[in-house]
Structures are given as C-alpha cells and as structure tokens.
Amino acid sequence: MSAGQGGPGTGAAERESEGMTPAIAQRPRDAAVTRPITHSVAERVRNVVSITRRSLVHIARDPTQLTSVTIQPVLLTVLFVYLFGGAIPIPGGSYPDFIIAGLLALNLTLATMGTAVGLATDLQMGMINRFRVLPMWGPAVLVGRSLADLLTACLCELVSAVTGLAVGWRTSAGPLRIIAGFALMLFFAYSMSWVAACLGLNSKSPESAASFGFLVLFPLAFVSNAMVPTQHMPGWLQAITNWNPVSAVIAGARQLWDNPNPSASIGAWPMRHPIEASLAWSVLILVVAAPLASRYFRRRTTE
Amino acid sequence: MADPMIEADGLFKTYGRTRALAGVSFSVPAGSVLGFLGPNGAGKTTAVRILTTLALPDAGRARVAGIDVLAHPAAVRRQIGVAAQDATLDGLLTGRQNLALVGELSGMRTSQARARAAELLGSFELADAADRVVKGYSGGMRRRLDLAASLVTRPPVLFLDEPTTGLDPVSRQRVWEMIRELIGSGVTVLLTTQYLDEADALADRIVVVNHGQVIADGTPRELKVHSRSAHVEVTLAEPGPEAEQVIAPLVSGRVSVSADGLRLDAAADSAPGLATVLVRALDQAGMLVDNIEVRQPSLDDVFFALTGADIPVTTTDQVRKG
C-alpha cells in the first residue's frame, strides 16, 4: 500500500485498501453463465428509474434545456394571439380559444428535438458506451429518457394552459373532457419522443441531430391546422394537413375542450373522427418508432 | 499456470478499409496484469472493445472469465469493469452521482450503491470533490473517477484502456499507485498503453501489437533480453586512432567516435561480460580506459527494435478469414 507502515495515515490506508479491493478472481461455474441473462421486471423498473433520474438531474443542472417547454410556449402564445390573432377570423369563436390547442401540439412536437440532441450527445460523449458495458437492461437507456420527456411535456402543458388562460383562452368543457384533451396531447408527445430518439440515434453529432430534427419536426408541426383554418389552403396542401397526425391531435383537443374546430366540417376521416384518429396515429407511431429506436440503439452501440 | 481469465483467439476486425485486427491472440492468467502495448492505431482499443462486448470481431473467439463473449455478452458484463480511454463519465452529474448511477445500473440497491460510491470516492482521494459536477474535474480527477467507476461492482476482470494518456507526470504517478494497489488483490487486469515505462512498471507480461498483429509476447525482462540491443560507451584516457578497429568486431553496430577521439559509442549484443571483454581488448592494444558504460536495453529500445526496424514478425498464424 502506498501509505507508510505505522504512520498516522495507516488506519486510513487500511480503510482505503478495503474500498479498492475487488472480488478475488474466480471463474464462474460454466453452468451458471450459459443460462441466458434475463432482467426481472423489478430490475428493469429500477434501471429505468435511474436513467430517468439522470435526465432530470441534467435538467436541474442545465435549466436552459427547458426553454423549449417554458419560455417558448409563452413567447409563441403571446406572439400569435396579439400579432396575428386580430387578422385571422375564426368562425364560431375567438382566436385564443382556437390557437391554444394548436400551439400546445406545436410546442410539444418541437420540444422532442431535445431527445434527439440528448441521445446524440450521449453517443458522442461515450456515455452510452459506459451504459453498454454495465449489466443493465439495455432498453432502459431509451425508456428512461422517454419518461423524462413525458415529465417535461407535462410542464409544457401546464405552462401553455396558464399562458392560454392569461391571454383569454376559455373552455366550457367539464373537467374530465379537459383532462382527456391534455392526455391526448401527452400520448402523442410521448410517441413522438420515440421518433426523436430514432433521429438522434441516426445523427453523427448533437448539431446534426438538431438540424435533422428541425427538418423533420418543423414541417410536421407547421403544416397542420395549428395556426389557421385549413379550408383556404390549396387542395394538395389540405390533403397533407388533414392526414398529418398533428392536425388530428389538435382537432381532437379542440373537440374535447369545446373550442372552435373549423376542421370538423372537413370530409377526411381523421378530421371527422379526430380523437380516434389521434389515438390511432399515436399508437401507430409508438409501435413503429419504439422497436425501431431499440434496433438503431443496438446497431449504433455494437460495431 | 492458473486458468486464463481473458482469452483472445485469432481476432480479426476491419472497419471499412482499415484492418484494425489481423489475427490477434493472447491470454491473461487469473490474477495477473497484461500490458497491451502498441502505438496509436495498433488495434489495442479495438481488441478491448471486442473483449468488453462493445464490438463484434469479423472472425475469432474471445472469452472473459471463461464466458464466451460473443455468445453471452450480458453474462460477461457481470464480470468486468471498464475504464475506457475516452473517460466515459456524465459531465453534468457529480462524482458521487456518477458512481451511484453505475452501481444502480449494475443491479445494486440505491443505498448499497451510495455506500459503495462513498467508499470509492474516499479510496481515490476524491472525497472533497465528490459533490462537484464532473465537468469541472481536472484530467487526473476524471481518470481516477473513471477507475473508481470500473470498480463499483468489485469485478474480477478489469480493462484499463490507456488509463494515463494525456495526464501530467504527477497525476500519472497517482493513477499508477492506485492501479498498483489493485494488483495483488486477485483481480485480472488488461492494461493498454502506449507508454513502455507504464507497462514496465505495472504489467507481469507484455503483448506488443502493431498494425493489428501481435509482434512480441513475454515478461518485460524477456523482451529486453530478447532484443539483445545493449549500448556501449567507452571513454579513453588519450585519443587512440586504432581503438575503433579494436572494438568494432566486438559490437554489433557502427562505432562512432567523438571529435576529440576520446569517446566511442556503439550498439552491441547484450552478452554476459561484455564490459570485461571490451576493456581487455583495449588493454591488449595498449590503450588506457577511463570509463566504460554498458547500458542494458530499455523497453523503449525493444519497442523501437520491434516496431521501427523490420524485425521478423512473430505473428500468430491463425488466419481464418480475410
């Protein structure tokens, strides 16, 4: 040991050596190791909780990560309501009543960019390699992050709702329908965070993840019924907006919140049944994107 | 000899058009330290990545703690600790949180992981910095934390990938001390390094790799003896023009004479009694010797002899796939 014998540091040195001592080398019995290693549900849950907690600590240490779910919704709400609101007539209601559902879906969609950038950063910094050599349940890396995203999405909804109320958004719907509207949005945001995970896992760097995310998420969020009624758009664009999942989520929330929903008069199936369409889209996206993300994750982490 | 805890058998790996490993085989007996030595890009890190389940070889087999790495990677992960070259720590977490996270993800209970983290922070002299964010750590502190992270679960097999690259000499010495404390506790270590003195100081055996192939394998002593390249320096009392001819047959390299004709230098085969032989020859030629120095080869000499000059390469011939 490094500390001198009998010196004042001996006691400490002994404690230290105890801390450093690894297990005595022993080859495990072959029978025990050829059994495939499986993780119990409890182990998986614990791994997921650890990763989620890690993401939350990141946010606490670097709160600028939250701007897309706090400052941005406030800014966009104020901007749209006061800048454009007066110029856009909404049949059967006020612009704030119309725009809040649209802006919430827009903000939630754009906020998933954080997932893409975060995963790309973990890959670049080698943090994922550290996780990969641990005997943990691998998918926890992705599941844990998606749960942290779900929590920030809740914050986004809270901020958007409060800002909405401040600028004149009102709803006559009962509490259950209000909650259902927010839940519909949340489910969609959760499924989209797996799309963002796919983007992040296919990016070479955090910067490319950001621009990649922008290219995919920005049109998705804007080419929808979020900002304006779609009836005056050219036919081909209307077709896109009607079948855009974001439009279905927004129309669904407007319907649940008894807010003006000009899309209701459109013949396309998702616009006539926005709640069902929104749930179907979210399930479909989740079922495709989550396994795909796990596959990309494995591919990206084994050479 | 004890059962090998780490075995690589004919590993091949190609990245694009770069052949990283071209048939690398070696084994590490339980409780010993193998220095895996080679210049940058020799294939050291690739071999470590395969043995630690991060990469798949194109051909060849690998076993760690008796477990087939390709067939049972998850089981291998329960036996190994890894301190990688690009210190893989979470910069936004504190040192304590980093170690606790590794513990939790390895299956420890939260309280257990915290206790182990505190213990390791103490051993690695990081207790004062335990609750600081790792982003603010110095290079040496990060390496020590990374080393600590590899020991959280007390694994029987450790992979230390260039643990001191880029460190200042003082930090380097401290990391060495910490690795030395680990050695002898029964743990099996694979230590990759570009530094010969590091391998010399820490390893029981050294495997030298270059261009993806093993070019030498032995104890530090064996490698030095094997290279046979000693260095001779003779200082005469007065200039002797014929001294060069006297010693030339006794040494292996060209003899260089200083401008004043007093000092002669040459490479020589490291044979027993070389100094006596030289002094006797010079004495018989009537020359007075003031000083003679026969320097035994350092590992550096060995390394340059092996990698620089085109010395016959002793590779493994287990070529299975191109």
Image (cartoon, coloured by chain):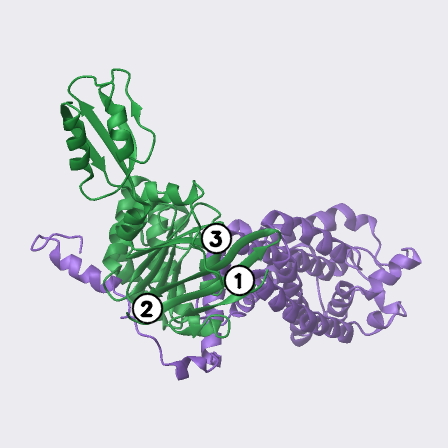
Q: Amino acid at mark 2?
A: Pro
Residue depicted at x 77% and y 58%: A226
* Left or right of residue B305, residue A145 in this image: right
Q: Secondary structure at mark 2?
A: loop
Q: Secondary structure at mark 1?
A: loop
Residue carrying label 2 = B156
Disc 3 packing (10 Å; few <14; some 14–19; many ≥20) = many
Earlier residue among tags 3 and 2: 3
Which dot, 3 or 2, sits closer to the camera? 3
**Label tally:** 3
Front residue of A63/A159: it is A63
Picture coordinates of residue B44 (x, y %)?
44, 53
**Residue at the extreme right:** A235
Earlier residue among tags 3 and 1: 3
Q: CA distance from mark 3 to mark 2?
A: 24 Å
* Left or right of residue A11, residue B10 in this image: right
Q: Chain of mark 1?
A: B
Q: Indicate the colour of chain A.
A: purple
Q: Amino acid at mark 3?
A: Gly
Residue carrying label 1 = B319
Q: Chain of mark 2?
A: B
Front residue of B259/B131: it is B259
Picture coordinates of residue A295 (x, y %)?
62, 68
